[in-house]
Amino acid sequence: MNLHHNPSEARAYTRRVFLGQSITLASAAVAVPHFLQASAMGLPMPELGLSSIPGVDEGNILVVVQLGGGNDGLNTVVPIGFDEYYRARPTIAIGRAQTLGLGGGDIALHPALEGLKSLYDEGLLGLIQGVGYPNPNRSHFKSMDIWQTADTSATGNGWISRYLDATCCGYGKGESGRPDSSRSKRQTPSADNSTNPMPAIAIGRTAPLAMEGGKIKPIAFETPDLFRWMGEDIHGSLVEPYHKLTQRQANDPDNDHPNADFLMRTSLEAQVSSDLIRKAVSQTPLVQYPNSDLARQLQMVASMIRAGLKTRVYYVTMGGFDTHAGQGNVNGTQANLLRQFADAMRAFYTDLKRQENDGRVLSMCFSEFGRRVSQNASGGTDHGTAAPMFLFGPMVRKGIIGDHPSLRDLDNGDLKYQIDFRSVYAGILEQWLSADSKTILNGRYRPLPILG
């Protein structure tokens, strides 16, 4: 394990990793490692005697869906009204007759996106055209870091991390500074989750950069089976001391050392979160989800929302969109990925509606960049710039948002962006999450109207 000494540089920790170390730490030297202190002190907690954090609307939830690899936006939201598109892509363009129409306009959806088309028809989909940023970078890693930090220099903490720090550390809307000293007197977590908000949750081996760097450390796990204390798998003798540790109350008068008290609180918080999440995910979903990895991730998110977890941001990821060859086949790689994406989102919102939670959950989907306008010699597309984003939920501004970028006025063969992605973030922060976007995004970006 890499032990960071600077809290701003600390990577995500999983509760499974912490719990696997807790017994060793309990019997080790009295000095608690700094990485543990930084992680535990980052857990958001309400003030003593309160059941929520002042100034934070805990009802609204954001789900971020990342399409990794640079999805080709032009073959996803097809510009059927532009002859330039068909001239630039003679063998991979999607024929007009094959597309899913959006009301007779100049754009339509890829035929694999039937799930998105049904959400669009029901008013649950907002399609934002031509999203990007100035001086675009065509490196997967650099561009993804730019999107994750909301900074074209790709430096600093993740934008979601900054949001959580600004709203869940007791600062309130748009405030900043140090937590009040009274916050160090933490409450003992309760297993019913009624008083404790939870960190952001990413489904995956590690948390994304968007959630990194702040006081509140995200939770990341691939499967709920691995998200538990694993000491009992190592040796039965560890079970009793671990349960004694987690069952003792914080600030117990028998505790002679503040580090021991701290360790018990931290261990109990970790155990409670692990128990809550595994119990939530074990529920049978209310709908049948497709057999894909993204659907599996969204099914877990829906289960945690249904169980009433206080988490405000969830993050799921789907990769494979780096389509440099063989893209013209409507049953090929990109088509299959788009179908998985659309069907998973459709099942997710059907599940949320049956839970009566759909009105609480706004989902935002992005990819790190689009593709070049012209096809390449391998029948695919190379790294480009601007691309569409998707917003999901009954609260979103339904329909088409913004104008399609020109296919004549190009930037060295690439689309010129029309909407800065940070304006989309600002709209979500201001209008949905009740947060001050200027503070979180470290700049002024006109919030895009994203609510209907």
Image: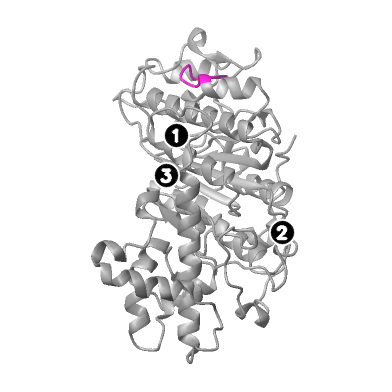
The circle drawn on residue 179 is none
Question: Of discs 2 and 3, which sits in the foreground?
Answer: 2
Give the spatial CA distance, label 1 vs label 2: 30 Å
Give the spatial CA distance, label 3 vs label 1: 28 Å
270 displayed left or right of 409: left
| Residue 63: quadrant of the picture | top right
Q: Where is residue 286 in the image (x, y as percent from the top left)?
A: 53, 31
Q: Please report the residue visible at 56 percent of the width from the left and 32 percent of the height from the top.
A: 351
Residue 286 to residue 101: above or below: below
- Label 3: which secondary element: loop
Q: Mark 1 points at which residue?
A: 295
Say whether disc 3 or disc 1 marks the residue closer to the N-terminus: 3
How packed mark 2 is, by other alpha carbons closer than 10 Å (few <14, some 14-19, many 20 or more), is: some
Say whether disc 2 or disc 3 marks the residue closer to the N-terminus: 2
Residue that sits furthest to the top in the current view: 97
The circle drawn on residue 138 is 3
Labels 1 & 2 near each other (Cβ < 8 A): no
Say whether disc 1 or disc 2 marks the residue closer to the N-terminus: 2
Q: Mark 2 points at which residue?
A: 56
Q: Position of residue 142 (x, y in %)?
A: 42, 52
Q: What residue type is labelled 3?
A: Arg
Q: Position of residue 92 (x, y in %)?
A: 39, 18
Q: Which amino acid does label 2 sit on?
A: Val
Q: Please report the residue visible at 54 percent of the width from the left and 33 percent of the height from the top.
A: 348
Magenta-colored stretch includes residue 367: no
Residue 411 to residue 173: above or below: above
How packed mark 1 is, by other alpha carbons closer than 10 Å (few <14, some 14-19, many 20 or more), is: many
Q: Is residue 197 visible?
A: yes
Question: Of discs 3 and 1, which sits in the foreground?
Answer: 1
* Residue range corresponding to the magenta coloring: 108-114
